[in-house]
Image: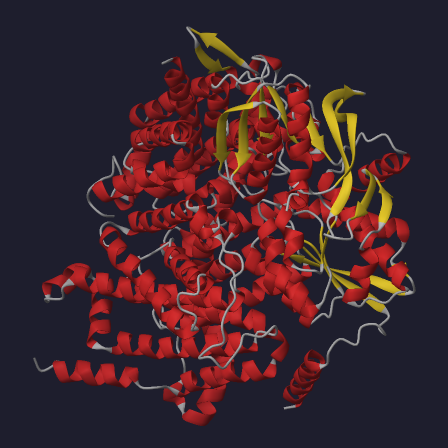
Amino acid sequence: MTTLFTILFDGVAYGMLLFVLACGLAVTLGLMNFVNLAHGAFAMAGGYICAVLVNNSGWPFFAALPLAFVVSAAIGVVLERALYRHLYARSHLDQVLFSIGLVFMSVAAVDYIMGSSRVFIKLPAALEGQFDVFGVGIGRYRLMIIVICGLLTVALQLILARTRFGSRLRAAVDDPRAAIGLGINVPQVFAITFAFGCGLAGLGGALSAEILGLDPYFPLKFMIYFLIVVTVGGSSSITGPFLASLLLGIGDVAGKYYVPKMGPFVIYTIMIVILIWRPNGLFGRTAAR
Amino acid sequence: MTTLPDVSTDAIASARWRPGEIAFWIVVVACGFLFPSRYLIMTDIVRLALFALSLDLILGYAGIVSLGHAAFFGVGAYSAGLLALHGIINEPVVALVVAGFAAMVLGFFTSFLVIRGVDLTRLMVTLGIALLLEALAERFSNITGGTDGLQGIEMQPILGRFAFDIFGKTGFFYSLIVLFLLFLLARRIVHSPFGLSLRAIRNNPLRAAAIGIPVNRRLIAIYTVSAFYAGVAGALFTQTTALASLDVFSFERSADLMLMLVIGGTGYLYGGLIGAVVFKMLQELFSTITPQYWLFWIGLVLVVIVLIGRARIHRWALWLPNLVIRQFAGRRAVVVVPESDPS
Amino acid sequence: MFIRRQLLLVAGALAVAATVPHARAQEETVKIGLIVPMTGGQASTGRQIDNAIKLYMQQKGDTVAGKKIEIILRDDAAVPDNTKRMAQELIVNEKVNVIAGFGVTPAALAAAPLATQAKVPEIVMAAGTSIITERSPYIVRTSFTLAQSSTIIGDWAVKNGIKKVATLTSDYAPGNDALASFKEHFVAGGGEIVEEVKVPLANPDFAPFLQRMKDSKPDAMFVFVPAGQGGNFMKQYAERGLDKSGIKVIGPGDVMDDDLLNNMGDAALGAVTAHLYSAAHPSQINKEFVAAYKKAFNNRPGFMAVGGYDGIHLIYEALKKTGGDATGDKLIAAMKGMKWESPRGPISIDPETRDIVQNIYIRKVEKVDGELYNVEFATFEAVKDPGKTKK
């Protein structure tokens, strides 16, 4: 019984991590209708920034995390202004070509600068190991992930639902022309949103180095996972991707634990079944855009 | 009903062979004789071209996007491999057709899953199917050889006469002939009334349904045909390399395929062929110059292509050939890449 | 028109070149086609081998027996059909005298028929499945086989009071080799396997598998994951508290690869593995090798680097022996039975199987001067590949 809870706990942590990594993509793909396959590259950037700061410059881990966010967001904003914004109106195929190109470049560039070996971030001792709560093994690091990601999710939900910026964003997405007419600076809203999504990915990348492993092929390896989260979750709100991440995380971990030989089947089967049952995702809007 | 004759004459006119097309095939065959030391890479390109042609049939003509086309490629590859390995069908040509049919059956059954939903859903469902198959192949490693792939495949001579040689000459001409025959068939299909109805569906499924085209049945049909093509491409892969390993199902294979087709342009059959040539040559060039960092330069090329615009690049690329064609065959014969993207 | 004529000339010349069978022995350069994964998940293997070869050629010069050695590097991304095509093109077009590298077993196997057909030696510098050398009389291996280290750790475990073992191995040929040979020796000695998990090769998260290990409460866990994944594995091993619950890691040394070991953290301390090479191997040759490698590439060499270093050494020595004659049969004959002192210790090429015979060391991870090292404490001398001696 206690094992079940441990599995559940691990699954939730893994899911939360996927959510932070992928929710930026949910925004660009779902809300701005831009297929940004390069999303993982921003996550990788965050991870490497954190690794360099902690390992080489001796920063404390918790100080490096926000910086991973900030720098990734900054890279995001620069790229958005310089390149991405020209492609919002282009066909999806162009966007795929472009963003895959960016992924290739980032992979090779990081390989060139940082080398191809896996990189690990030196963690503070407080985050290592596991402690028992009524026999359920709780990993400290995973607990931290759940806390950070949980807080982020709540904050995101509040920003989107309660703040002025949130309502502007929703307006800009629902009907950009009307939004412009109402005096909303739509390009600016999009740029800020994009950067924020990249920042979250960067933070996720820094957090995930410990669990998923960080090497130059990160964006390619996890692209599929991000896409699954976004398509299964649907794109109308962040609730969908959030639940999809949890489902994917728990399904993956439980599948590997209980039927280790069938591990990969579990996720892909869940995904196909859900997409056939609800082609627009769990929380998709029904009207095709 | 007065417009009907116009539509048909127009269709017939567009189905006619153009000088540019003839020139294209002459150049292709000539390459086979001009570069005898490069058969292997050219075989690779021919296989990819067939594979890309298969994707073009559904993407360019029916508007179905797929990120999992390697599923059919893989089924074809493993079928051909298993047939040869266990000596069930030793004749490569027969085995090729059988492997194609195996992929076709899979295509037929999965088509019901794919025709539902919007672009993104289709992308993920097709991708999911390919990944599932990859996991299956890994799981049943007693049949497929798992991560190590099928070992010890030995190919019999084609039609009992032409043995596969180390230079890859037989393999190249064999692949090229298969490509050409299937290209002819594809050409026939897309210019038939069936093909025209597909284009109607791509442009507007609702309107197509309204004028009485059975949308779903047509989509299932073309998806199945496309699966056959991909299966044949996969079988060619196994037969010319005597290898079949898990990576035939890989996401990278499907993704590269998509890149090739998009570079070459969709919806005019030659896009996949040209894309395969361009993509593979670039890859070969860069990876010879810098084996470590060639991905960077490929990526840069992709980004630049998009920023300049594919339409503009196509015009530039065709400027010289068209200049020549205009000299010989007049202004009307010039080659144009149609810019039609689904989505 | 002029250009076209030139093209034709070039093409014609190529055609002639392709049909003339290798007039190699007279040529002044010896070409070595190095096919390794330089991109993709296995990239670190290729990098280490490439680095080691560069280092060797810096140290020993690029001429041997009057021949200039030329390395032609190709990236196969560990995809076997790439390997095969590149090997074929290198043999046919570049007229290489030796093909070398091969990061993974399928890649090595894919090139085997070509080696036989073209009578070109294939030097396997990384891939570690037993069957490889049986696939062509032209294959020589300078890396290792998994059976070598796995049988020995199996024997060692029984003798050292380990009764119950849970296994975690990657699900592909080397992993299955490792598991089978370990099991055979461990169970024969009276040990018990309480849990057996095969993990997929491409694996993001070990957590659930590790939980299974923990729940089966073994004395130790036998681990094989390919080079490069060991770091992640150990991190999660520690995170799950397996080090605290007294479950030791044992296995072939791949999991404790030297190039990652120092980043694994203190959880790795005390892990006992059997392997062919440790950067802490106490010999003068090794000290110099490690120092030179560190200086050149700013990293510790792992066992893949040693495989490459010995591979190129073998080619050099074979050329010396044949007096610069680089025909395939002569080279292979020269390589058979060759003995030398490598950074890993004394090694030789088995004249029967063309596989490597080497010492296998039992090592324990310890802290030396603040860094983690595999410190050797027992040696099994001149171990042949048990995967073959069986038959």
Look at the picture and state if B213 lies above or below A128. below
Residue B67, percent from left and from top: 38, 53
Look at the picture and state if A93 lies above or below B321. above
The quarter of the picture where the C terminus of chain B appears is: bottom left
Identify which residue, B84 or C58, lies in the foreground. B84
Residue C115, percent from left and from top: 67, 64
Identify which residue, C325 or B35, lies in the foreground. C325
Q: Is residue C322 left or right of residue B121?
A: right
Look at the picture and state if C338 lies above or below C210. below
Exactly how many numbered labels are in the figure? 0
Residue B208, percent from left and from top: 15, 64
Asked if residue C205 can be seen in this view, the reply is no
Identify which residue, C306 or A29, lies in the foreground. C306
The quarter of the picture where the N terminus of chain B appears is: bottom left
Q: Quadrant of residue A210?
A: top right
Identify which residue, A126 or B91, lies in the foreground. B91
**Residue in the picture at 60% in, 38% down:** C226
Q: Residue furthest bottom?
A: B328
Q: Residue furthest top?
A: A134
Give the colour scheme shown. Answer: secondary structure
Q: Quadrant of residue B64?
A: bottom left
**Residue in the picture at 20% in, 62% down:** B204
Residue B79, percent from left and from top: 40, 61
**Residue in the picture at 67% in, 45% down:** C45
Asked if residue C365 can be seen in this view, the reply is yes
Look at the picture and state if C54 lies above or below C300. below
